[in-house]
Amino acid sequence: MLDISLLTKNDVEAAGRIWCALEKEVHPTSVTCRWDFVSTWLELYGDVVEYWFAVGTVEDEVIGMTLITKETHRPLPLSVAAYHIGTNGEPFSDAVQVKHGKILVKKIYEREFYAGVLEAINTFKWEEIVLDDVDAGVADGFVGVLKKNERDAGPRQHDDEVYNIFYY
């Protein structure tokens, strides 16, 4: 059975060790799954963005890990409690704008991990969950989880196979 733990910004060193160990097992092809990229993003935005590390385990084996961030500084008439999966949520004027973002997870556990990440976000008071510019496979995985739970994603925008999913 999958268990999701949330580590805070006070746990960056431990999160880095866990992330790097999983990275060595999974051998990700996307820079968005590499600790070098994630830790650099945290150095740039960690002081202005609330974030957590979602760590998925099955029988004490780490099977997936991603960043959950609370969006800050989006220019809207009313504030929205938006949470992002991955390295997003930074002030828009300074955004890195990752394309084809992926999630660090063992392939056989993808859907289960995606479902667990959404359940973890449900522990927060949220109004919107956003996957910014994710790879088509990641988008399909999350949309599949939502459909299985009889939930629907909002606008699923795509441009050159890069997807944005908004879940309300």
Image (tube, grey):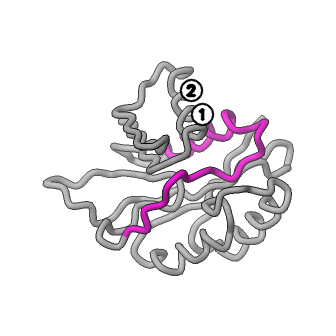
Residue beneath label 2, please? 144
Q: Quadrant of residue 13?
A: bottom right
Mark 1 residue element = helix
Percent across and percent down for residue 70 are: 42, 59
Above or below 82: residue 107: above
Q: In the figure, 54 relative to 118: above or below? A: below
Q: Is residue 96 left or right of residue 20?
A: left
Tell me the quarter of the image containing the N terminus: top right
Q: Which mark is residue 141?
A: 1
Residue in the foreground of this view, choosing between 161 and 19: 161
- Mark 1 Cα-neighbour bin, 10 Å: few <14, some 14–19, many ≥20: some
Question: Decide: marks 2, 1 in contact (CB < 8 A)?
Answer: yes
Is 104 part of what is drawn in magenta? yes
Q: Position of residue 18 (x, y in %)?
A: 77, 64
Q: For the residue marked with disc 2, what is the amino acid?
A: Gly
Q: Which residues are magenta?
A: 95-122
